[in-house]
Structure formats: C-alpha cells, structure tokens
Image (cartoon, helix red, strand yellow):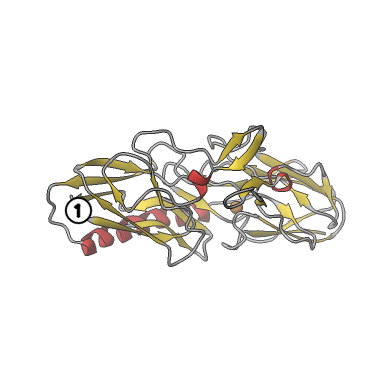
Amino acid sequence: MIVGGEVNNSAIESNLFHPREIDVAVGDTVAFKFEGNHNIAFTSGQPRPPARISEGGKVYLNTQFWFPSGGETYDGTGYRSSGPSAGDPKFTYSLTFTKAGTYEYVCLFHSRQPGISGTVNVRERVFNSPAAVERRGRSEQAATLKAAQAAWATWEPERQGETVVLPLIGDPKAGFSFLRFSKQPLVVTPGTTVTWVHRDPLRPHTVTFLSGETAPPAAIPEPQPQGPPRLVPNPKRDLPTPTKTHDGTGFVHSGNFFGPGAMPPFPTAPTSFSLTFTKPGQYEYVCLFHQAEGMKGTVIVR
Ligand SMILES: [Cu+2]
C-alpha cells in the first residue's frame, strides 16, 4: 500500500491511499509505505482522536494523535495508529489482519473530508499478489498526481483593486494539495496589500516572515514529575501577529491557518492573512508546516 505521493519537488501532494481499497486474506500483513507526511489510523468506528486535549485547564498535544498506538495485529476492534511519518522517506507501518471484515482507515492529518479514507477487505482467501496491489496503487497515484498537475497549471493570483489574493488551494474531492504559495515571486508596487486565502480543507499552512529569526517550534515540552514530558502547543505558532504592514523587519506570522471545512485544533484559527507592503525590497516568507517540502515565497516590492 502506498500512502500519499508527491511530484514537482513536493509542490503537489496526494492525500490519498493508493490503492484506495484492497483485498487481503485473514492472517495477511499489509505494509504501508509512506510518501510524504501522513499517518494511518484505524479507529474501529470510534471518532478519530483530536490533535489536542484539555487536562486540568491546560491544553496538550494528544499522544493518541501524534504517536504510534496499538499493537501489530488488528481484528476490527480498538485503535491502531502508525504515528506521523514526518516526511521520513523510509517510514513504513505494518499491520496483520486476524479477522475477516471490512475495515476503514484514515490519515488523521489529511482525511478530514468524507470519502478520503482507505478500505481493507479481509477475506477468508484471496488470489491477488502484493505486486499486483502495488501496481494498481502506482497507477491510481499517477492519475491523482496528473490531475493535480493539470489543476496547478491553471493557478493564478487574483487581483481585487489594490489587493493581490494568493489562494492556497487543493482539491478535497480529488485528494490533492498544493504546497506552494505561487509559481514565481510576486511583484507588487509599494502600498499593495497581499492576502493569502486558505481554500484547502486538507492541509494547514502558515505565512511567516521570519526576518532572520529561527522558526518557532510547534510545541514546547513540559517536564512531568514522572514519565516523558508532555507537549504544549506554542502560542507563538498558533496565533497571528497583530502586524498589518511589513517593511522587512520583525517576526510577522499568520498563525496556523486552515481552509474552510477543516477541523482546526483551536476555535480562533484564521482562514486568511493580509499584509500591506510599504517599502521597496524583496521579502522572503515560509510555511512553517511545509518548509521541508519547499513551501517558500517571495514578495518583491518595486
Ligand atoms: Cu504549508
């Protein structure tokens, strides 16, 4: 099984499982190969775990969401999760299916849309080979990425008077996302407002002008009297800076923002971010989620 997929230097990513549905025999092991940053979770009909939980008036990252969980076998009950692949190209996850049945699974990060899920049909016996499954997966993946490339070819910034809108898009039905802000540096005149509008429910992004600062971590470890530290979401990462203009100085950040239909882990998550550029110059910014995938942008003011 192939989880996800990417093309054009990770500019375009599949959020699907390839193939979407497989038949295996009781006792078979399914090996999930990860391409891109995803995870695999079998919830046995229970609600998926939230990314964050509150305890004693404090908010923590939910270990069920962010770490591997459950054993190496699955009989259709309980919770099994691979944990995040974190972009590791060698990341794999294996699960042995011990009972006949139809089992649905999701990626906790990117399967928020109904229909973006995978199915394992466990039968008494099957006759397909692992190689045939992988071939079918590659062909479904190629079709998804080809459709994504065609959609990206039509992407353009939108102009609304003095404002330039950069839409952050993907196709939740077709199961792909774009991890780019634009095709080339955006050139604007002084006084122009640039608005990044998030329209992809599958992926969070940030618009972050670091201006020489190091990127703030997503979470801060909090030591515990016993056991491993717990992780507290970093407010510097979550929330937008109040800045409305940018002249190349200071940390300017959209906060973690989400597209319509996404399930943000905190209720005040923004869906767009605007900045007015006052001074001629060249301004570099990044998405803190997708820096490794090359999600960087440039605004040139002249
Ligand atoms: Cu991003």
Q: Is residue 165 left or right of residue 128?
A: right
Query: Residue 78, position in %: x, y?
Result: 35, 40
The residue indicated by pointer 1 is 27
Depth check, front residue: 25 or 70: 70
Depth check, front residue: 273 or 131: 131
Residue sitting at 80 percent across and 60 percent down?
Answer: 211
Question: In the rendered structure, which amino acid carries the disc numbered 1?
Answer: Gly
Depth check, front residue: 162 or 53: 53
Q: Is mark 1 within 8 Å of ligand 1?
A: no
Query: Residue 164, position in %: x, y?
Result: 71, 46
User: Does the rendering let one see residue 166?
Assistant: no
Mark 1 surroundings: few (<14), some (14-19) or many (≥20) residues within 10 A: some
Query: Residue 207, position in %: x, y?
Result: 69, 51
User: Does the rendering let one see residue 99?
Assistant: yes
Residue sitting at 51 percent across and 49 percent down?
Answer: 66
User: In what quadrant of the picture does the N terminus appear?
Assistant: bottom left
Query: Residue 213, position in %: x, y?
Result: 78, 60
